[in-house]
Protein backbone atom coordinates (compact mmCIF):
# COMPACT_ATOMS: atom_id res chain seq x y z
CA UNK A 1 0.00 0.00 0.00
CA UNK A 2 1.24 3.48 -0.91
CA UNK A 3 0.93 5.61 2.20
CA UNK A 4 1.79 9.20 2.89
CA UNK A 5 1.26 10.32 6.45
CA UNK A 6 1.88 13.99 7.18
CA UNK A 7 3.21 13.48 10.67
CA UNK A 8 6.77 14.65 11.19
CA UNK A 9 7.32 12.70 14.41
CA UNK A 10 6.11 9.48 12.76
CA UNK A 11 8.05 9.89 9.54
CA UNK A 12 11.33 10.78 11.21
CA UNK A 13 10.90 7.92 13.68
CA UNK A 14 10.21 5.39 10.89
CA UNK A 15 13.21 6.68 8.95
CA UNK A 16 15.45 6.41 11.99
CA UNK A 17 14.25 2.87 12.79
CA UNK A 18 14.65 1.73 9.18
CA UNK A 19 18.23 3.03 9.11
CA UNK A 20 18.98 1.26 12.40
CA UNK A 21 17.24 -2.07 11.75
CA UNK A 22 17.98 -2.26 7.99
CA UNK A 23 14.89 -4.19 6.80
CA UNK A 24 14.70 -5.34 3.16
CA UNK A 25 11.42 -3.47 2.78
CA UNK A 26 8.87 -1.37 4.66
CA UNK A 27 5.16 -2.19 4.59
CA UNK A 28 2.49 0.22 5.90
CA UNK A 29 -0.45 -1.80 7.26
CA UNK A 30 -4.06 -0.77 6.62
CA UNK A 31 -5.83 -3.29 8.89
CA UNK A 32 -7.93 -4.72 6.05
CA UNK A 33 -9.18 -8.28 5.84
CA UNK A 34 -7.34 -8.59 2.53
CA UNK A 35 -4.09 -7.73 4.33
CA UNK A 36 -4.80 -10.26 7.10
CA UNK A 37 -5.64 -13.03 4.61
CA UNK A 38 -2.55 -12.32 2.52
CA UNK A 39 -0.15 -12.40 5.49
CA UNK A 40 -1.77 -15.57 6.87
CA UNK A 41 -1.49 -17.27 3.47
CA UNK A 42 2.17 -16.23 3.33
CA UNK A 43 2.87 -17.68 6.78
CA UNK A 44 0.97 -20.88 5.96
CA UNK A 45 2.99 -21.28 2.76
CA UNK A 46 6.23 -20.78 4.71
CA UNK A 47 5.19 -23.39 7.29
CA UNK A 48 4.99 -21.13 10.36
CA UNK A 49 1.17 -21.29 10.38
CA UNK A 50 -0.87 -24.50 10.15
CA UNK A 51 -4.27 -24.13 8.48
CA UNK A 52 -6.96 -25.77 10.66
CA UNK A 53 -9.20 -27.59 8.20
CA UNK A 54 -11.82 -28.23 10.90
CA UNK A 55 -12.15 -24.59 12.01
CA UNK A 56 -13.11 -21.91 9.50
CA UNK A 57 -10.37 -19.34 8.80
CA UNK A 58 -8.30 -20.47 11.79
CA UNK A 59 -4.59 -21.11 12.18
CA UNK A 60 -2.21 -22.78 14.61
CA UNK A 61 1.27 -21.43 15.41
CA UNK A 62 3.98 -23.26 17.34
CA UNK A 63 6.53 -21.01 18.99
CA UNK A 64 10.12 -21.78 19.77
CA UNK A 65 10.14 -23.68 23.11
CA UNK A 66 12.15 -20.81 24.61
CA UNK A 67 9.52 -18.22 23.66
CA UNK A 68 6.29 -19.26 25.39
CA UNK A 69 5.37 -16.53 27.89
CA UNK A 70 5.98 -13.00 29.13
CA UNK A 71 9.54 -12.59 30.40
CA UNK A 72 9.27 -10.64 33.66
CA UNK A 73 13.01 -10.88 34.40
CA UNK A 74 13.70 -9.20 31.06
CA UNK A 75 11.04 -6.47 31.47
CA UNK A 76 12.31 -2.99 32.35
CA UNK A 77 10.83 0.30 33.50
CA UNK A 78 13.48 2.77 32.46
CA UNK A 79 13.03 6.05 34.32
CA UNK A 80 15.80 8.61 34.87
CA UNK A 81 15.76 7.86 38.60
CA UNK A 82 15.84 4.20 39.70
CA UNK A 83 13.65 5.03 42.67
CA UNK A 84 10.80 6.10 40.38
CA UNK A 85 10.49 2.57 38.94
CA UNK A 86 9.95 1.22 42.47
CA UNK A 87 10.82 -2.11 44.09
CA UNK A 88 8.51 -4.24 41.89
CA UNK A 89 10.15 -3.35 38.56
CA UNK A 90 13.51 -4.08 36.94
CA UNK A 91 15.35 -0.87 36.17
CA UNK A 92 18.15 0.22 33.86
CA UNK A 93 18.96 3.83 33.04
CA UNK A 94 17.50 5.08 29.74
CA UNK A 95 21.01 5.85 28.45
CA UNK A 96 22.41 2.38 29.25
CA UNK A 97 19.35 0.50 28.08
CA UNK A 98 19.10 2.43 24.82
CA UNK A 99 22.80 1.89 24.15
CA UNK A 100 22.52 -1.87 24.68
CA UNK A 101 19.31 -2.21 22.71
CA UNK A 102 20.48 0.02 19.84
CA UNK A 103 23.39 -2.40 19.49
CA UNK A 104 20.95 -5.29 19.25
CA UNK A 105 18.61 -3.46 16.86
CA UNK A 106 21.47 -2.67 14.47
CA UNK A 107 20.72 -4.68 11.31
CA UNK A 108 18.24 -6.87 13.20
CA UNK A 109 15.60 -6.77 10.41
CA UNK A 110 17.99 -7.77 7.60
CA UNK A 111 16.25 -10.12 5.17
CA UNK A 112 12.83 -9.21 6.60
CA UNK A 113 9.95 -6.81 6.03
CA UNK A 114 9.38 -4.04 8.54
CA UNK A 115 5.64 -3.65 9.14
CA UNK A 116 4.25 -0.31 10.29
CA UNK A 117 1.08 -1.03 12.31
CA UNK A 118 -1.13 1.99 13.13
CA UNK A 119 -3.57 1.18 15.94
CA UNK A 120 -6.02 2.63 18.41
CA UNK A 121 -6.40 1.33 21.95
CA UNK A 122 -10.09 1.88 22.55
CA UNK A 123 -12.77 2.76 20.00
CA UNK A 124 -11.32 4.99 17.28
CA UNK A 125 -12.07 8.57 18.26
CA UNK A 126 -13.17 7.94 21.87
CA UNK A 127 -11.88 10.65 24.24
CA UNK A 128 -10.52 7.83 26.43
CA UNK A 129 -8.65 6.09 23.56
CA UNK A 130 -4.96 6.41 22.66
CA UNK A 131 -3.16 5.87 19.37
CA UNK A 132 -0.04 3.79 18.90
CA UNK A 133 2.19 2.80 16.02
CA UNK A 134 3.99 -0.51 16.32
CA UNK A 135 6.90 -1.24 14.04
CA UNK A 136 7.53 -4.99 13.87
CA UNK A 137 9.32 -7.52 11.69
CA UNK A 138 6.81 -10.25 12.57
CA UNK A 139 3.75 -10.92 10.36
CA UNK A 140 2.36 -13.00 13.27
CA UNK A 141 2.36 -9.79 15.32
CA UNK A 142 0.56 -7.91 12.52
CA UNK A 143 -2.25 -10.50 12.36
CA UNK A 144 -2.63 -10.64 16.14
CA UNK A 145 -2.67 -6.83 16.34
CA UNK A 146 -5.49 -6.84 13.76
CA UNK A 147 -7.60 -8.76 16.28
CA UNK A 148 -6.38 -7.33 19.60
CA UNK A 149 -6.38 -3.63 18.64
CA UNK A 150 -8.09 -1.42 16.06
CA UNK A 151 -5.68 -1.38 13.11
CA UNK A 152 -6.95 0.93 10.41
CA UNK A 153 -5.81 3.36 7.71
CA UNK A 154 -8.09 5.88 9.47
CA UNK A 155 -5.33 6.13 12.08
CA UNK A 156 -3.03 7.55 9.37
CA UNK A 157 -5.57 10.34 8.75
CA UNK A 158 -5.72 11.09 12.48
CA UNK A 159 -1.90 11.17 12.64
CA UNK A 160 -1.82 13.46 9.61
CA UNK A 161 -4.26 15.72 11.46
CA UNK A 162 -1.64 15.99 14.19
CA UNK A 163 -2.86 13.48 16.80
CA UNK A 164 -0.36 12.11 19.29
CA UNK A 165 0.77 8.47 19.20
CA UNK A 166 2.88 6.13 21.28
CA UNK A 167 5.81 4.66 19.32
CA UNK A 168 6.24 0.91 19.90
CA UNK A 169 9.35 -0.67 18.40
CA UNK A 170 9.42 -4.45 18.13
CA UNK A 171 11.83 -6.92 16.58
CA UNK A 172 12.02 -10.66 16.98
CA UNK A 173 15.79 -10.18 16.90
CA UNK A 174 16.61 -12.72 14.20
CA UNK A 175 18.15 -11.15 11.07
CA UNK A 176 18.31 -13.36 7.99
CA UNK A 177 21.53 -13.50 6.01
CA UNK A 178 21.26 -13.94 2.24
CA UNK A 179 20.27 -17.51 1.41
CA UNK A 180 19.72 -18.40 5.08
CA UNK A 181 16.65 -20.58 5.69
CA UNK A 182 14.26 -18.99 8.18
CA UNK A 183 13.25 -20.73 11.41
CA UNK A 184 9.57 -21.60 11.86
CA UNK A 185 9.50 -19.31 14.93
CA UNK A 186 12.54 -17.03 14.80
CA UNK A 187 13.46 -15.22 18.04
CA UNK A 188 16.49 -14.26 20.13
CA UNK A 189 17.92 -16.18 23.11
CA UNK A 190 16.63 -15.24 26.56
CA UNK A 191 19.63 -13.10 27.58
CA UNK A 192 19.09 -10.95 24.47
CA UNK A 193 15.36 -10.41 25.07
CA UNK A 194 14.35 -6.98 26.37
CA UNK A 195 10.84 -5.64 27.02
CA UNK A 196 11.59 -1.99 27.76
CA UNK A 197 9.41 0.92 28.73
CA UNK A 198 10.36 4.59 28.86
CA UNK A 199 7.34 6.08 30.65
CA UNK A 200 8.85 9.58 30.80
CA UNK A 201 8.69 9.79 26.99
CA UNK A 202 5.84 7.29 26.30
CA UNK A 203 8.08 4.92 24.37
CA UNK A 204 8.27 1.11 24.11
CA UNK A 205 11.21 -0.94 22.82
CA UNK A 206 10.82 -4.72 22.63
CA UNK A 207 13.47 -7.08 21.31
CA UNK A 208 13.93 -10.81 20.90
CA UNK A 209 10.49 -12.33 21.52
CA UNK A 210 7.50 -12.88 19.24
CA UNK A 211 5.14 -13.99 21.99
CA UNK A 212 1.97 -12.36 23.35
CA UNK A 213 2.60 -9.62 25.85
CA UNK A 214 6.25 -9.34 24.78
CA UNK A 215 5.36 -8.56 21.17
CA UNK A 216 1.74 -7.36 20.92
CA UNK A 217 2.81 -4.04 22.38
CA UNK A 218 -0.67 -2.46 22.59
CA UNK A 219 -1.66 -4.79 25.42
CA UNK A 220 0.50 -5.08 28.55
CA UNK A 221 3.22 -2.63 27.44
CA UNK A 222 1.02 0.25 26.22
CA UNK A 223 -2.43 -0.29 27.76
CA UNK A 224 -1.03 -1.12 31.21
CA UNK A 225 2.60 -0.11 31.84
CA UNK A 226 2.80 3.09 29.78
CA UNK A 227 -0.90 3.93 30.27
CA UNK A 228 -0.70 3.51 34.07
CA UNK A 229 2.07 6.12 34.18
CA UNK A 230 0.12 8.44 31.84
CA UNK A 231 -3.05 7.88 33.87
CA UNK A 232 -1.38 8.99 37.08
CA UNK A 233 0.00 12.13 35.44
CA UNK A 234 -3.34 12.91 33.78
CA UNK A 235 -5.72 11.89 36.59
CA UNK A 236 -7.35 8.72 35.23
CA UNK A 237 -6.86 4.96 35.76
CA UNK A 238 -5.40 2.13 33.66
CA UNK A 239 -6.17 -1.13 35.43
CA UNK A 240 -5.71 -4.89 34.96
CA UNK A 241 -9.47 -5.48 35.17
CA UNK A 242 -12.27 -7.27 33.36
CA UNK A 243 -15.44 -5.25 32.77
CA UNK A 244 -18.93 -6.73 32.76
CA UNK A 245 -22.56 -5.59 32.84
CA UNK A 246 -25.11 -7.29 35.06
CA UNK A 247 -28.81 -6.74 34.47
CA UNK A 248 -31.32 -7.71 37.15
CA UNK A 249 -34.83 -9.06 36.40
CA UNK A 250 -36.24 -5.51 36.67
CA UNK A 251 -33.82 -4.37 33.95
CA UNK A 252 -31.53 -2.33 36.20
CA UNK A 253 -27.92 -2.39 34.99
CA UNK A 254 -24.79 -2.64 37.12
CA UNK A 255 -21.24 -2.36 35.81
CA UNK A 256 -18.46 -4.31 37.46
CA UNK A 257 -14.68 -3.99 37.07
CA UNK A 258 -12.65 -6.79 38.65
CA UNK A 259 -8.93 -7.42 39.17
CA UNK A 260 -7.54 -10.91 39.81
CA UNK A 261 -4.02 -12.31 39.62
CA UNK A 262 -3.37 -14.99 36.97
CA UNK A 263 -5.04 -18.42 37.28
CA UNK A 264 -8.16 -17.08 39.04
CA UNK A 265 -10.43 -17.32 35.99
CA UNK A 266 -10.77 -13.66 34.99
CA UNK A 267 -11.85 -14.49 31.44
CA UNK A 268 -14.34 -17.04 32.81
CA UNK A 269 -15.93 -14.41 35.06
CA UNK A 270 -15.99 -11.84 32.25
CA UNK A 271 -18.07 -14.26 30.12
CA UNK A 272 -20.11 -15.84 32.91
CA UNK A 273 -23.68 -17.12 32.44
CA UNK A 274 -25.63 -16.49 35.67
CA UNK A 275 -27.50 -19.39 37.28
CA UNK A 276 -30.00 -17.16 39.07
CA UNK A 277 -33.19 -16.76 37.01
CA UNK A 278 -33.76 -13.41 35.31
CA UNK A 279 -30.21 -12.11 35.73
CA UNK A 280 -28.11 -11.38 32.64
CA UNK A 281 -24.35 -10.93 32.31
CA UNK A 282 -22.67 -9.30 29.33
CA UNK A 283 -18.97 -9.01 28.61
CA UNK A 284 -17.25 -5.67 27.94
CA UNK A 285 -13.65 -6.79 28.39
CA UNK A 286 -11.61 -9.57 29.99
CA UNK A 287 -8.25 -7.97 30.79
CA UNK A 288 -7.85 -4.19 30.84
CA UNK A 289 -9.98 -1.20 31.90
CA UNK A 290 -9.25 2.46 31.21
CA UNK A 291 -11.34 4.70 33.41
CA UNK A 292 -11.99 8.44 33.56
CA UNK A 293 -14.24 10.58 35.73
CA UNK A 294 -17.12 11.75 33.52
CA UNK A 295 -19.14 14.96 33.53
CA UNK A 296 -21.54 13.17 35.91
CA UNK A 297 -18.74 12.72 38.44
CA UNK A 298 -18.80 8.94 38.07
CA UNK A 299 -16.00 6.66 36.88
CA UNK A 300 -16.51 5.54 33.26
CA UNK A 301 -14.65 2.53 31.85
CA UNK A 302 -13.71 1.41 28.37
CA UNK A 303 -12.00 -1.77 27.26
CA UNK A 304 -8.99 -0.51 25.27
CA UNK A 305 -8.66 -3.88 23.52
CA UNK A 306 -10.43 -5.27 20.48
CA UNK A 307 -10.14 -8.98 21.26
CA UNK A 308 -9.25 -11.75 23.67
CA UNK A 309 -5.80 -13.27 24.03
CA UNK A 310 -6.95 -16.03 26.35
CA UNK A 311 -5.31 -19.03 28.01
CA UNK A 312 -6.63 -22.13 26.23
CA UNK A 313 -5.88 -25.01 28.68
CA UNK A 314 -8.77 -25.43 31.11
CA UNK A 315 -11.24 -23.72 28.77
CA UNK A 316 -14.15 -26.04 27.95
CA UNK A 317 -17.90 -26.10 27.41
CA UNK A 318 -18.04 -26.84 31.16
CA UNK A 319 -15.87 -23.98 32.44
CA UNK A 320 -16.54 -21.31 29.79
CA UNK A 321 -19.04 -22.19 27.02
CA UNK A 322 -19.09 -18.56 25.86
CA UNK A 323 -15.34 -18.59 25.20
CA UNK A 324 -15.69 -21.90 23.37
CA UNK A 325 -18.32 -20.32 21.11
CA UNK A 326 -16.14 -17.22 20.67
CA UNK A 327 -13.30 -19.33 19.22
CA UNK A 328 -15.32 -21.39 16.74
CA UNK A 329 -13.90 -19.54 13.71
CA UNK A 330 -11.46 -16.78 12.68
CA UNK A 331 -9.02 -17.64 15.46
CA UNK A 332 -5.25 -17.67 15.87
CA UNK A 333 -4.17 -20.48 18.18
CA UNK A 334 -0.68 -20.51 19.63
CA UNK A 335 0.98 -23.58 21.18
CA UNK A 336 -2.16 -25.72 21.23
CA UNK A 337 -2.06 -29.35 20.12
CA UNK A 338 -3.21 -30.37 16.61
CA UNK A 339 -5.76 -33.17 16.10
CA UNK A 340 -5.58 -35.70 13.27
CA UNK A 341 -8.65 -34.13 11.62
CA UNK A 342 -7.18 -30.63 11.57
CA UNK A 343 -8.55 -29.06 14.75
CA UNK A 344 -6.93 -27.85 17.97
CA UNK A 345 -7.00 -29.52 21.37
CA UNK A 346 -5.72 -28.62 24.81
CA UNK A 347 -5.74 -30.13 28.29
CA UNK A 348 -9.16 -29.69 29.88
CA UNK A 349 -10.97 -29.00 26.58
CA UNK A 350 -12.87 -32.31 26.49
CA UNK A 351 -13.43 -35.15 28.97
CA UNK A 352 -12.27 -37.59 26.34
CA UNK A 353 -8.60 -37.26 25.44
CA UNK A 354 -7.78 -37.81 21.75
CA UNK A 355 -5.87 -41.03 21.02
CA UNK A 356 -3.35 -39.19 18.87
CA UNK A 357 -2.22 -35.58 18.55
CA UNK A 358 0.68 -33.49 17.33
CA UNK A 359 1.87 -31.68 20.47
CA UNK A 360 2.83 -28.00 20.71
CA UNK A 361 6.42 -28.92 19.90
CA UNK A 362 5.31 -30.65 16.67
CA UNK A 363 5.87 -34.22 17.93
CA UNK A 364 3.52 -37.21 17.93
CA UNK A 365 1.55 -37.40 21.18
CA UNK A 366 -0.64 -40.08 22.78
CA UNK A 367 -2.32 -40.19 26.21
CA UNK A 368 0.70 -42.23 27.36
CA UNK A 369 3.05 -39.32 26.64
CA UNK A 370 4.67 -37.82 29.70
CA UNK A 371 4.38 -34.16 28.68
CA UNK A 372 1.30 -32.02 28.04
CA UNK A 373 -0.01 -31.89 24.46
CA UNK A 374 -0.65 -28.15 24.64
CA UNK A 375 1.67 -25.74 26.43
CA UNK A 376 0.06 -24.64 29.76
CA UNK A 377 0.24 -21.04 28.47
CA UNK A 378 -1.22 -21.89 25.03
CA UNK A 379 -3.47 -19.12 23.75
CA UNK A 380 -6.37 -18.22 21.49
CA UNK A 381 -6.67 -14.84 19.79
CA UNK A 382 -10.22 -13.88 18.78
CA UNK A 383 -12.11 -10.65 18.13
CA UNK A 384 -14.34 -9.45 20.98
CA UNK A 385 -17.11 -8.83 18.42
CA UNK A 386 -17.34 -12.62 18.00
CA UNK A 387 -18.24 -13.14 21.65
CA UNK A 388 -21.92 -14.17 21.85
CA UNK A 389 -22.44 -12.19 25.09
CA UNK A 390 -20.51 -9.08 24.10
CA UNK A 391 -22.34 -6.04 25.49
CA UNK A 392 -23.95 -3.73 22.91
CA UNK A 393 -22.19 -0.83 24.66
CA UNK A 394 -18.74 -2.42 24.61
CA UNK A 395 -17.57 0.15 22.04
CA UNK A 396 -19.45 3.11 23.49
CA UNK A 397 -16.86 5.91 23.34
CA UNK A 398 -18.16 7.29 26.65
CA UNK A 399 -17.55 3.97 28.40
CA UNK A 400 -19.81 2.44 31.06
CA UNK A 401 -20.27 3.83 34.61
CA UNK A 402 -18.61 1.53 37.14
CA UNK A 403 -20.68 0.63 40.23
CA UNK A 404 -18.56 -2.13 41.70
CA UNK A 405 -14.85 -2.91 42.00
CA UNK A 406 -13.88 -6.47 42.88
CA UNK A 407 -10.48 -7.67 44.00
CA UNK A 408 -9.66 -11.26 44.72
CA UNK A 409 -7.23 -14.09 44.83
CA UNK A 410 -6.92 -17.82 45.09
CA UNK A 411 -6.80 -18.82 48.78
CA UNK A 412 -7.45 -22.34 50.07
CA UNK A 413 -8.00 -20.93 53.57
CA UNK A 414 -8.44 -17.78 55.68
CA UNK A 415 -10.22 -15.51 53.13
CA UNK A 416 -14.04 -15.73 53.05
CA UNK A 417 -16.11 -16.05 49.87
CA UNK A 418 -16.98 -12.36 49.85
CA UNK A 419 -16.57 -9.23 51.91
CA UNK A 420 -17.22 -5.56 51.32
CA UNK A 421 -14.79 -2.82 52.23
CA UNK A 422 -15.88 -0.42 54.98
CA UNK A 423 -14.95 2.57 52.83
CA UNK A 424 -12.71 3.61 49.93
CA UNK A 425 -9.48 3.61 51.98
CA UNK A 426 -10.27 0.14 53.30
CA UNK A 427 -10.97 -0.99 49.73
CA UNK A 428 -7.62 0.38 48.56
CA UNK A 429 -6.05 -1.51 51.48
CA UNK A 430 -7.72 -4.73 50.25
CA UNK A 431 -6.46 -4.12 46.70
CA UNK A 432 -2.96 -3.25 47.88
CA UNK A 433 -2.68 -6.45 49.95
CA UNK A 434 -4.35 -8.81 47.42
CA UNK A 435 -2.65 -12.18 47.41
CA UNK A 436 -2.97 -15.49 45.62
CA UNK A 437 -1.60 -18.98 46.10
CA UNK A 438 0.55 -20.13 43.21
CA UNK A 439 -0.71 -22.95 40.99
CA UNK A 440 1.11 -25.10 38.46
CA UNK A 441 0.29 -22.35 35.93
CA UNK A 442 2.60 -19.97 37.85
CA UNK A 443 6.31 -20.25 38.29
CA UNK A 444 7.77 -21.52 41.56
CA UNK A 445 6.43 -23.90 44.18
CA UNK A 446 2.70 -24.68 44.20
CA UNK A 447 0.73 -23.20 47.11
CA UNK A 448 3.04 -20.29 47.98
CA UNK A 449 1.28 -17.05 48.91
CA UNK A 450 2.20 -14.24 46.53
CA UNK A 451 1.15 -10.62 47.00
CA UNK A 452 -0.03 -9.13 43.74
CA UNK A 453 -1.48 -5.70 44.62
CA UNK A 454 -4.44 -4.84 42.35
CA UNK A 455 -3.15 -7.68 40.08
CA UNK A 456 -0.83 -4.95 38.81
CA UNK A 457 2.55 -6.07 40.16
CA UNK A 458 3.89 -7.07 36.71
CA UNK A 459 2.13 -4.20 34.93
CA UNK A 460 2.57 -0.99 36.92
CA UNK A 461 4.79 1.40 34.97
CA UNK A 462 5.95 3.35 38.02
CA UNK A 463 6.54 3.09 41.79
CA UNK A 464 3.70 1.07 43.33
CA UNK A 465 3.69 3.22 46.47
CA UNK A 466 2.77 6.15 44.21
CA UNK A 467 0.20 3.93 42.51
CA UNK A 468 -1.53 3.26 45.86
CA UNK A 469 -1.52 7.01 46.51
CA UNK A 470 -3.11 7.60 43.09
CA UNK A 471 -5.93 5.22 44.05
CA UNK A 472 -6.49 7.22 47.25
CA UNK A 473 -6.47 10.48 45.25
CA UNK A 474 -9.05 9.10 42.81
CA UNK A 475 -11.27 8.15 45.76
CA UNK A 476 -10.99 11.69 47.12
CA UNK A 477 -12.07 13.10 43.76
CA UNK A 478 -14.93 10.60 43.32
CA UNK A 479 -16.28 11.09 46.85
CA UNK A 480 -19.81 9.72 47.20
CA UNK A 481 -19.84 8.66 43.54
CA UNK A 482 -16.96 6.21 43.95
CA UNK A 483 -17.64 2.54 43.13
CA UNK A 484 -18.07 0.27 46.15
CA UNK A 485 -15.22 -2.18 46.70
CA UNK A 486 -15.49 -5.92 47.39
CA UNK A 487 -13.05 -8.79 47.88
CA UNK A 488 -13.82 -12.37 46.78
CA UNK A 489 -12.27 -15.81 47.08
CA UNK A 490 -13.87 -18.55 44.96
CA UNK A 491 -11.22 -21.05 46.05
CA UNK A 492 -11.62 -21.77 49.80
CA UNK A 493 -11.25 -25.47 50.59
CA UNK A 494 -12.53 -27.80 53.27
CA UNK A 495 -10.29 -29.71 55.71
CA UNK A 496 -10.24 -32.61 53.24
CA UNK A 497 -9.10 -30.38 50.39
CA UNK A 498 -12.39 -29.97 48.46
CA UNK A 499 -13.53 -26.66 46.98
CA UNK A 500 -16.36 -25.40 49.17
CA UNK A 501 -17.93 -23.05 46.61
CA UNK A 502 -19.19 -24.27 43.19
CA UNK A 503 -17.86 -21.11 41.52
CA UNK A 504 -18.34 -20.35 37.81
CA UNK A 505 -22.01 -19.53 37.01
CA UNK A 506 -22.92 -19.63 40.70
CA UNK A 507 -20.65 -16.66 41.31
CA UNK A 508 -23.67 -14.69 40.01
CA UNK A 509 -25.13 -15.20 43.50
CA UNK A 510 -22.24 -13.28 45.01
CA UNK A 511 -22.54 -10.55 42.35
CA UNK A 512 -26.27 -10.28 43.07
CA UNK A 513 -25.50 -9.62 46.75
CA UNK A 514 -23.11 -6.84 45.72
CA UNK A 515 -25.82 -5.23 43.55
CA UNK A 516 -28.29 -5.41 46.42
CA UNK A 517 -25.71 -3.79 48.70
CA UNK A 518 -25.41 -0.92 46.18
CA UNK A 519 -29.19 -0.49 46.21
CA UNK A 520 -29.36 -0.68 50.02
CA UNK A 521 -31.64 -3.72 49.79
CA UNK A 522 -29.55 -5.92 52.08
CA UNK A 523 -27.57 -5.28 55.20
CA UNK A 524 -24.22 -6.76 56.21
CA UNK A 525 -22.54 -7.78 59.41
CA UNK A 526 -19.49 -5.89 60.58
CA UNK A 527 -16.53 -8.19 61.10
CA UNK A 528 -12.84 -7.67 61.82
CA UNK A 529 -11.98 -7.83 58.12
CA UNK A 530 -14.96 -6.13 56.48
CA UNK A 531 -18.69 -6.37 55.84
CA UNK A 532 -20.03 -9.89 55.27
CA UNK A 533 -23.46 -11.10 54.07
CA UNK A 534 -26.00 -11.76 56.80
CA UNK A 535 -27.38 -15.30 56.98
CA UNK A 536 -30.01 -15.68 54.27
CA UNK A 537 -28.91 -12.66 52.22
CA UNK A 538 -26.89 -14.63 49.66
CA UNK A 539 -29.38 -16.07 47.14
CA UNK A 540 -28.70 -19.82 47.39
CA UNK A 541 -32.00 -20.98 45.88
CA UNK A 542 -31.61 -24.11 43.79
CA UNK A 543 -28.08 -24.62 45.07
CA UNK A 544 -27.14 -27.62 47.19
CA UNK A 545 -24.11 -26.35 49.08
CA UNK A 546 -24.34 -27.84 52.61
CA UNK A 547 -24.99 -25.35 55.40
CA UNK A 548 -21.72 -26.35 57.05
CA UNK A 549 -19.84 -25.46 53.85
CA UNK A 550 -21.52 -22.05 53.68
CA UNK A 551 -20.56 -21.50 57.31
CA UNK A 552 -16.95 -22.40 56.55
CA UNK A 553 -16.93 -20.18 53.43
CA UNK A 554 -17.99 -17.21 55.56
CA UNK A 555 -15.93 -18.02 58.65
CA UNK A 556 -13.49 -15.40 59.96
CA UNK A 557 -10.50 -17.22 61.38
CA UNK A 558 -9.19 -14.38 63.54
CA UNK A 559 -6.08 -16.34 64.59
CA UNK A 560 -5.15 -17.00 60.94
CA UNK A 561 -5.78 -13.33 60.09
CA UNK A 562 -3.53 -12.25 62.96
CA UNK A 563 -0.85 -14.53 61.50
CA UNK A 564 -1.12 -12.64 58.19
CA UNK A 565 -0.28 -9.27 59.73
CA UNK A 566 3.53 -9.63 59.74
CA UNK A 567 3.47 -10.55 56.05
CA UNK A 568 1.37 -7.47 55.23
CA UNK A 569 3.79 -5.34 57.25
CA UNK A 570 6.76 -6.78 55.33
CA UNK A 571 4.88 -6.22 52.07
CA UNK A 572 4.21 -2.55 52.87
CA UNK A 573 7.79 -2.04 54.09
CA UNK A 574 8.99 -2.92 50.57
CA UNK A 575 7.58 0.38 49.35
CA UNK A 576 9.60 2.39 51.87
CA UNK A 577 8.49 5.95 52.53
CA UNK A 578 6.27 5.96 49.43
CA UNK A 579 3.63 3.80 51.16
CA UNK A 580 0.75 6.17 51.93
CA UNK A 581 0.16 6.90 55.59
CA UNK A 582 -3.55 6.15 55.05
CA UNK A 583 -2.74 2.51 54.19
CA UNK A 584 -0.55 2.10 57.27
CA UNK A 585 -3.51 3.48 59.23
CA UNK A 586 -5.77 0.84 57.64
CA UNK A 587 -3.33 -1.83 58.77
CA UNK A 588 -3.36 -0.44 62.32
CA UNK A 589 -7.16 -0.45 62.34
CA UNK A 590 -7.27 -4.05 61.10
CA UNK A 591 -4.80 -5.00 63.85
CA UNK A 592 -6.97 -3.28 66.44
CA UNK A 593 -10.13 -5.03 65.21
CA UNK A 594 -8.38 -8.42 65.36
CA UNK A 595 -7.37 -7.68 68.95
O1 LIG B 1 -12.61 -19.52 36.59
C1 LIG B 1 -12.93 -20.05 37.64
N1 LIG B 1 -13.91 -19.45 38.43
C2 LIG B 1 -14.53 -18.16 38.01
C3 LIG B 1 -15.60 -18.41 37.07
C4 LIG B 1 -16.53 -17.52 36.70
N2 LIG B 1 -12.32 -21.22 38.03
C5 LIG B 1 -11.25 -21.81 37.23
C6 LIG B 1 -9.91 -21.28 37.72
C7 LIG B 1 -8.79 -21.59 36.82
C8 LIG B 1 -8.62 -20.55 35.75
C9 LIG B 1 -12.70 -21.81 39.18
N3 LIG B 1 -12.27 -22.93 39.77
C10 LIG B 1 -13.71 -21.25 39.98
C11 LIG B 1 -14.35 -20.05 39.59
O2 LIG B 1 -15.23 -19.55 40.26
N4 LIG B 1 -13.86 -22.05 41.07
C12 LIG B 1 -12.97 -23.07 40.92
C13 LIG B 1 -12.79 -24.19 41.87
C14 LIG B 1 -13.76 -25.30 41.50
C15 LIG B 1 -13.43 -26.23 40.55
C16 LIG B 1 -14.36 -27.24 40.22
C17 LIG B 1 -15.58 -27.28 40.87
C18 LIG B 1 -15.89 -26.35 41.82
C19 LIG B 1 -14.99 -25.36 42.14
N5 LIG B 1 -16.55 -28.27 40.67
C20 LIG B 1 -16.51 -29.36 39.88
O3 LIG B 1 -15.50 -29.62 39.29
C21 LIG B 1 -17.73 -30.17 39.76
MN1 LIG C 1 -3.92 -10.11 32.10
Image (cartoon, grey):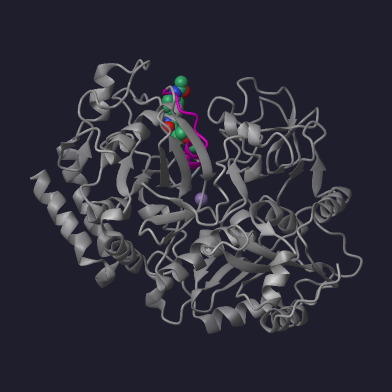
x and y percent of residue 33 in the render?
80, 52
x and y percent of residue 550 in the render?
27, 23
Is 72 in front, or is 459? 459
Would you identify the image quadrant in which residue 539 lies? top left
Q: Residue at x 25, y 33 (%)?
A: 521
Residue 478 appears in view: yes
Assign the C terminus to one quadrant of the image.
top left
Q: Is residue 325 left or right of residue 62?
A: left
Is 1 in front, or is 403? 403
The range drawn in magenta is 265-276
Is 442 in front, or is 300? 300
Q: Residue at x 18, y 55 (%)?
A: 587
x and y percent of residue 344 in the render?
72, 34
x and y percent of residue 400 in the render?
46, 50
Q: Residue furthest right?
A: 179
Q: Is residue 60 left or right of residue 196?
A: right
Residue 259 appears in view: no
Amino acid sequence: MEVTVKNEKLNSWIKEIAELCQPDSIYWCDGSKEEYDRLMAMMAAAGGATVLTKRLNSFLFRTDPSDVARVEDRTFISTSSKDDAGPTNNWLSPADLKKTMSGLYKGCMKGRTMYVIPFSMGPIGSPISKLGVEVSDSPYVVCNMHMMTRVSSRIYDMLSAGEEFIPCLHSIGAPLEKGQKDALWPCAPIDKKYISHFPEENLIWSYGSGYGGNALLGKKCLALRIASAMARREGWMAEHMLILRLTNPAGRQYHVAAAFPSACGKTNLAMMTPTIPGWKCECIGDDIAWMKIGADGRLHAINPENGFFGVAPGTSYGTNPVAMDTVRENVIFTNCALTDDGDVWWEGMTDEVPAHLIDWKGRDWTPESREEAAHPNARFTARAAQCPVICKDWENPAGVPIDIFIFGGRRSGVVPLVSEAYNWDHGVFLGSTAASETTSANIGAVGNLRRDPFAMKPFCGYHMGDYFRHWLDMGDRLGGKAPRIFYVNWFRKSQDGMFLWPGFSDNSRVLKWMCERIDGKVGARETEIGLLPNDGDLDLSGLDVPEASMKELMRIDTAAWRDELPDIERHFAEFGNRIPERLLQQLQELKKRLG
